[in-house]
Image (cartoon, grey):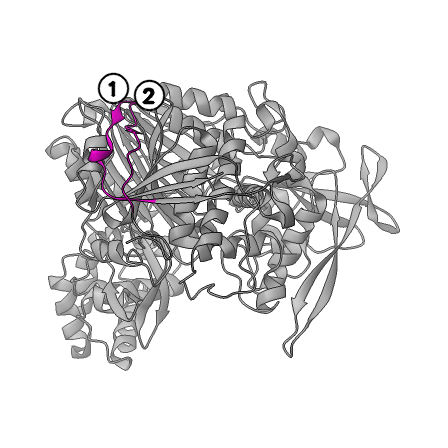
Amino acid sequence: MPPSGHSAARTDETHHAPDGRALPSTQLPEKENIRVSQTQTRDGLGRARPARGEQQGHGLSATIRYTEFGIPHIVANSYRDLGFGQGYAAATDNMCSLAQTMLTTSATRSKYLGGDAPLQGILASGQKNLVSDLYFQGINDSGVVERLVAQRGKLGPAQEVRDVVSGYAAGVNRFLRENRITDPGCKGAAWLRPMTEIDIYRHMYAAGMAFGQGAAAGGIVSAAAPGVTAANDGDLGSNAISFGGKATANGKGISLANPHLPWHAPDIRLWQSHLTIPGRLNASGAGVVGLPLLWLGHTETMAWSGTAADTTRTFTLFELTLVPGSPTQYLADGRPEEMTRRDVTVTVAKPGGGTENVTRTQWSTRYGPIVQQLGDQKLPWTAETAFADANAQNMRMGNSTLKLMQARTTDEAMRGLKETQGLSWMNIFVTDFRGAATYHQLHVVPNVTDARAAECNTSLGKRTYPERGIAVLDGSRSTCGWGQDRDAVQPGTSGPASLPTLSRGDYVENSNDSYWLTNPRQPITGFSRILGTAETPRNPRTRMGLTAIEEQLAKGKFTRESLQDLMLSNRNMLAELAVDDLVRLCRTMSSDVKEACDTLSTWDKESNVESGGALLFDRFWAKSCASVPGPALWKVPFNPANPVATPNTLNTDQPGVAKAFTDAVAELRAANIPVNAPWGDYNYVVRNGERIPIGGGASNMGVFNAVSGAWDPTKGYAEMQHGATYLHALSFNNSSCPDSATLVAYSQSANPASAHYNDQTKLCSRKQWVTERFCEEDILASPKLRVVQVRQR
């Protein structure tokens, strides 16, 4: 139905398909004509904006065609118009998510929500708003985002990106100005405000640093309380597979996208859209709400997906040698340098009403900000040393994503990424209609070779580098700075030739492990520790994915349907390795656990919503990992010559294994949970009072469809914290209409009042997908087609 305040009206305008051919208005259903007129000024970036800081557009127009499940297909004549349409559509579904992110990056959460209130999102570490605000206010006071945006040439945003950002802000504001907010998350909120271009660039900058400086935010503002750590590596994840023609039934490429992200982080919420400029751009996929363009998706002939490079460190630390008696001066090649002091002030709401200013001093050096804690590694400021995190002069993310959206082949995609080098922490997987599949760890990473680390790591670095890939370099010597690659766009980063890549005719795959077993038939070695490890144990989800791929190839080649089956099969790798041994063990135990033994003996070893035994094994495994060191759980240890199959064989001789089982049984009984309870009865979400069971399981148990929540002994896993977000399973064919199925697991909208708040979540529960409508005739044939024309002058 039309937005509030607008009625549907037929027009006689001519419309165009993405291929440029004219469509008479009789081919379109009723559409909504929405027009406004505005006056503009200029902002500090030289961009058009009206008075009082509101970013709007001039002469903007876009057509939004909605198909089933609220998926928008946006057609426009320019990048600015395209951004306008995408911003409007994103705000329609997720205005409160957009507003929450602006609240974060403008450092005003404490002003409106209180400094002690819990932080929402992943852009900064720390559990409270005050930590986040002090961190982002420090960034904003420094002017670094404005300086990076002002750069021209390869280091700054491309003109098309600038245009789409400008239009996106105008589209958000167009929606905000003309529509009634129904989402209780921000309805009537004093902090709901128009978007500016700088809001988008700040979000882009923060998203790029989420695993570097953002993870150290608590340490930067000197506010990291005991026990507060950076985001765990397992909090963000993904699966990605690109199949080449040798592994597919039709000889064309097949792509899987399956990013795992927080379900309640407004600043990295994925949202699906289809973006078209006739004759210039035609790409469909998902991007982050609040950021224009697409992070994952496909064109007519090329598809890309990605995974978070969890094993790579996108930062280093530098240990400083302080000048004796002067703790804010450090030595650089024997000469003293003064740290830069910045007194950062944020406004904080007082519990009794009113506000107060809170000021903290932050220090920075030539390398970056001073940090006092990074995750669980404390870095205290002492009379002798200080530590600085060096990360991120990157405002090229939009450049790289746009190149992907413009590419027609794998070669074009790789060429575009090498030209721009703007992806911040994502491994990239590409395939095309010719059947060419490629992986490249082509993202921004410090240029630190193992030789440089051996020469320059301090005593702390000599521990953290081999263990965790974190280099702690000697900041007193300029020769210990980051190296220079001739093919690197950004000085101090690794160029494409120094980063892992693999092209195959069969497949390339990643599940948040390092580059090593991207394809076990051709292991990748020879790269520095900062990029990950080789010949070390793989995570169970990697092993499950590779096992499932090889088993399918032994039976026959892949189709889009068989890829969907693999994705949502919910096989539990560790159950396949351990349950039979566990059943033999429990048969020797007291009769108290007989029912539990029987449950596991008949379990299908899958984590489907109906699977009885999955919950019992989940609780057993959690307790086993907590009480028995990882390698001791297995009788057959890891073997680098057989890495997918090892370790294996549950070590039932370990006393902790039997105790973990009896403890798991006792825990469930104490909570009045049957030991054979179906997984979906206790792994679910509640949306508008409706309980929706969710399949999938923990990544550390090797469930490819990874989901995770916080265990509540009285309710089970009552809400998803992380898991599948956007999925696509796509096969190319002999037409320009790829055979594609998609799913947004938490649905398109975060607004409980929206019809698209939980519709796809219900599909996810039933293992159902959405058949994608990409070509014009398919879009126009949608029984749910609704057309919205948005304009402003």
Any magenta on residue 10?
yes
Which amino acid, by three-letter code, is at mark 1? Arg
- Comparing 306 with 494, the one in front is 306
Residue occupied by mark 1: 434
Q: CA distance from mark 2 to mark 1?
A: 8 Å
**In terms of depth relative to the viewer, which is nearer, 510 or 223?**
223
When the figure is inspected, residue 655 is found, relative to residue 370, above or below; the finding is below
Q: Residues within 10 Å of mark 2 (few under 14, many from 20)?
A: many
Give left or right: position of 82 versus 549: right
The residue positioned 37% from the left and 19% from the top of the image is 411
- Image quadrant of residue 434? top left
Q: Position of residue 45 (x, y in %)?
A: 65, 36
Q: Nearer the viewer, residue 788 or 254?
A: 788
Q: Position of residue 410 (x, y in %)?
A: 34, 22
**Picture quarter with the N terminus:** bottom left
SS type, badge 1: loop
Reading the image, the residue beneath label 2 is: 409
Q: Residue at x 80, y 45 (%)?
A: 339
Evaluate if marks 2 and 1 touch, with contact meaning CB atoms under 8 Å apart: yes
Please state the horizontal and vertical placement of residue 200, each as a whole percent of the image: 54, 43
Residues drawn in magenta:
9-32
Which corner quadrant of the image does residue 616 belong to? bottom left
Label 1 Cα neighbours within 10 Å, binned few <14 / some 14-19 / many ≥20? some
| In magenta stretch: residue 31 | yes
Q: Is residue 287 left or right of residue 251?
A: right
Q: Residue 256, percent across and down?
A: 28, 37
Which comes sooner in the sequence, label 2 or label 1? 2
Classified by dominant secondary structure, the portion drawn in magenta counts as loop
